[in-house]
Image (cartoon, grey):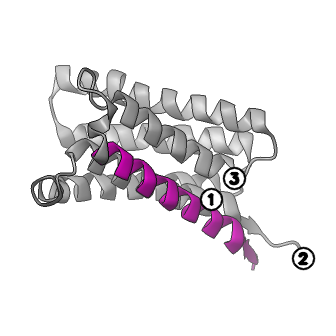
Amino acid sequence: MNNLMFNWSNFLRTIIIFLVLTIVWTFLCIKYDEFTDIDKGLVSGLGYLILLAVSIGQNFNHIGKIVFFIFLTIMTFLIGSYVIGPLIGFTTNSMILYSIINSVFVSVTMAFFLDKLRGIEFKKSTTILTFLFLLLAYFIIDQIEDFLYIDYDMHPRLTMFIIFQFALIIPITIGITLKKAST
């Protein structure tokens, strides 16, 4: 039987950094009305993507890898939003199909990049767990985004970023910090 080693300090540090950055950024987005009246969502969206990449990237051993991972994270989400989304919209206009395809794309892409940059020992398990968490995120977003907007004036776009990225960072961080124990 294989023994597993879980690095709790890396896991907790990553999640705490992510939560603190997310709370601060969300407060700023709400306080300053997402920073712009012309193109709502661009600045706030890039901010959320950067803080996700920095939270995960602080586990890397080189600043160049962090910068590259920030770029890869932004590109992954731009492709998911502006390529996969419209393709699904033109063909079937199904949110369920988009949720499944985008969850597969993001989980496979992020696990692949992180394996190359940091190393993920359990790639398949991490990818599957990430996929399931992202599907759950889509369900949760659908259920609560209007509630948060009506009661707390939190735009559904902010709700989507927070829930989706939280559902992404948990399994990815587990994948990074879980290793086979040396015997």
Please, what is the three-letter code of the amino acid marked with disc 2? Answer: Thr
Callout 1: 10 Å neighbours few (<14), some, many (20+)?
A: many
Q: Can you identify the residue that label 2 sits on?
A: 183
Callout 3: 10 Å neighbours few (<14), some, many (20+)?
A: many
Considering every residue shown, the one lying at the far front of the view is 32
Q: Residue at x 19, y 39 (%)?
A: 95
The quadrant the C terminus occupies is bottom right
Please, what is the three-letter code of the amino acid marked with disc 3? Answer: Ile
Q: Are marks 2 and 1 in contact (CB under 8 Å)?
A: no
- Residue 172 appears left or right of 183: left
- Residue 72 appears left or right of 181: left
Check if residue 17 falls in the magenta segment.
yes
Please, what is the three-letter code of the amino acid marked with disc 1? Answer: Gly
Q: Can you identify the residue that label 1 sits on?
A: 175
Question: Could you tell me residue 19's position as x and y percent?
Answer: 48, 61
Q: Can you identify the residue that label 3 sits on?
A: 120
- Residue 81 appears left or right of 17: left
- Nearest the camera: 138 or 42? 42
